[in-house]
Amino acid sequence: MFLGYWFIKKVMWASQTSIKSNAASLKKFYVFLLEKGLIKKEDLNELEETIKDEMPEWLATLKQYDDQSDIEDF
């Protein structure tokens, strides 16, 4: 929800690169939490699977939102 909706709509500088970078940062954070014993391996696996499955949709949503913003500027 964060990367696929809120981030795209609320962060003016949202881009493909920033979405991918944020996803990578979340993965690193989950690895840290796993190493500290604060989450289970399944939680990390679920996050990774979600990012893998949802990334194409997030990027498509970003493109659609950007295209719509360009039209509204006229």
Image (tube, grey):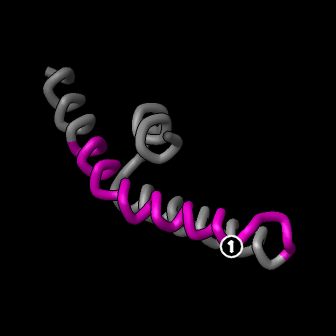
* Amino acid type, mark 1: Lys
Asked if residue 69 lies left or right of residue 9, the reply is left
Give the x, y percent position of residue 65: 26, 35
Residue at the spot of label 1: 41
Residue located at (37% from left, 54% from top): 54
**Magenta segment, which residues?**
36-63
Q: Is residue 28 left or right of residue 72?
A: right
**How far from the left and from the top, in percent, is residue 1?**
49, 40
Q: Quadrant of residue 40?
A: bottom right
Q: Is residue 47 magenta?
A: yes
Q: Residue furthest bottom?
A: 35
Residue 41 percent coordinates (x, y): 68, 73
As drawn, the residue found furthest toward the front would be 42
Judge the density around disc 1: few (<14), some (14-19), many (≥20) Cα neighbours within 10 Å.
some
Q: Nearer the viewer, residue 41 or 12?
A: 41
Taking the image as shown, residue 8 lies to the left or right of residue 42, namely left
For the C terminus, the quadrant is top left
Q: Secondary structure at mark 1?
A: helix
Residue 22 among magenta residues: no
Task: Give the residue drawn at x 48%, y 41%.
Answer: 7
Above or below residue 1? Residue 70 is: above
Query: Up-down: is 19 above or below 49?
Result: above
